[in-house]
Amino acid sequence: MAFKINRAVFILVALFTTFISFWLYLKLFLRFSDGEISQTGDTSSSTAEDISLNSPKDLTLRFQEDGTFRIVIFEDLHYGEGTYIAYVEWLSPV
Amino acid sequence: MNSILDVESPQLVVLNGDLIAGEATYLENSTAYFDLIVAPLVERGIPWASTYGNHDSNFNLSRAALFGRENSYLLSLTQLISLPGDAGITNFYVPVYPSDSSSNTPALMLWFFDSRGGKKFQVPSSAEDAGIPEVVHDSAIAWFKETSVRIAANYDKIIPSLAFFHIPPSTMVELQSQGVDPSKEPGINDDVPVAAQEGDESFVSAILNTPGLLATFSGHDHGNDWCYKWTGEKVHEDESKMGLFHCFGRHSGYGGYGDWVRGSRQILMKEDTLFEEIETWIRLEDGSISGSVMLNATYGKDSYPVVERRGSAVK
């Protein structure tokens, strides 16, 4: 009986390890296979349909009732650079 | 971005270039970063308009693909106008209407230009023609001049306007060399000389000769966030009482060089003083305000607190 349990646990562990190894291989392959020899198109795997968008509304810009209009400028975000974003990307595969 | 949007209440966000570090992306997900960028704006329902920068074009990232991604968002006001030649993508304008909803005449016009740069998509960087010039294309300048005249004619009035582009004009190099007074043009001034557009005489001429243009805004130089009153020949002084200004924004992202405290430039326009003044300041991500100034007829003479150079605790 003990032998059978050990065998079952062994098989489960082996399957799990195989799955994780395969998943890691795919991740690494996808991340490091696109050097300057790649000639395929942009194959971003997430699409607009995956993204939660706001419902349609009138986007006409207009001064507020108090007569003001406020603009915020964000610039030089450089997404994709640095470990933080790589970490986010790793955890949230697209 | 979240910390700033928690304390400011904009009607519009401008993403003024270098949204993505194209050289650090992989083909399969290069444009997917855009979803991360705009998530705080989508969450708050704030519309935005973009200009693309020199880092938004590279071997694995094209401006066209980035625009395709951006264009899938209903909150994006960025437009693609068909122009001859390699004019880039983000050359367009957005009108802002008066608070009086019965008026169909814009109170303010916002112009956006693609100052280009970076590397061509899927062209090896070793190729001689891999680079894209860092300057607004002639066809975009021609379109701007023709369209601004047509708009003025259509409405039979000069409409005040602002312009946004990523790489500053070359005239900022000369203005900086004349000296940026820390008490009269407050801001950090660490990028010397300014990295600017190249061969942009036509663009500068168009800016200086566009009636109603009040101020231009650029990024690119992470170490500069001052405003300067533009000197030179201007033909619209009879319309504007304030002059023409150029302001650098503030390095907002955690990519790119520099360890200055991150932040963003704020612009406050008032309907009844459009031709007289623009209030602007830098909101830092720690919630404090830096370099708050009034762009008006006396800017350059008025004294302001000197901006303290502060490094970020997070590199």
Image (cartoon, coloured by chain):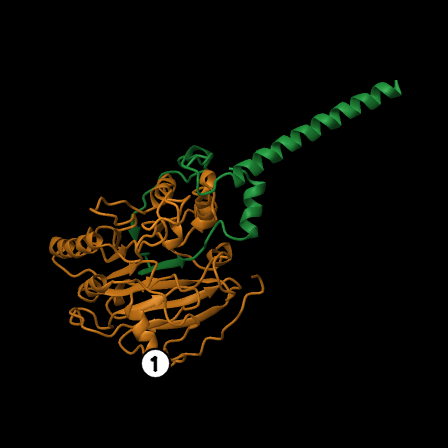
Chain colours: A green, B orange
Query: In the rendered image of this protein, does residue B195 appear above or below residue A1?
Result: below
Viewer-nearest residue: B249 or B6:
B249
Q: Is residue B14 in view?
A: no
Percent from the top left, x then y, of residue B219? 38, 61
Determine the residue positioned at 41% across, 46% down: B45
Viewer-nearest residue: B14 or B53:
B53
Q: Chain of mark 1?
A: B
Disc 1 on helix, strand or loop? loop
| Total marks in image | 1
Query: In the rendered image of this protein, does residue B248 appear above or below residue B154?
Result: below
Q: Is residue B116 in view?
A: yes
**Which corner quadrant holds the C terminus of chain B?**
bottom right
Residue on which the image places disc 1: B302
Instruction: Judge from the rendering whether residue A17 lies leftward or rightward of residue B192; answer left or right.
Output: right
Q: Image quarter for residue B42?
A: top left
Q: Image quarter for residue A38?
A: top left
Viewer-nearest residue: B192 or B105:
B192
Instruction: Judge from the rendering whether residue B282 lies leftward or rightward of residue B200; answer left or right.
Output: right
Determine the residue positioned at 36% across, 50% down: B119
Given the image, on which type of amino acid does mark 1 rest? Asp
Q: Image quarter for residue B17?
A: bottom left
Percent from the top left, x then y, of residue B144? 20, 55
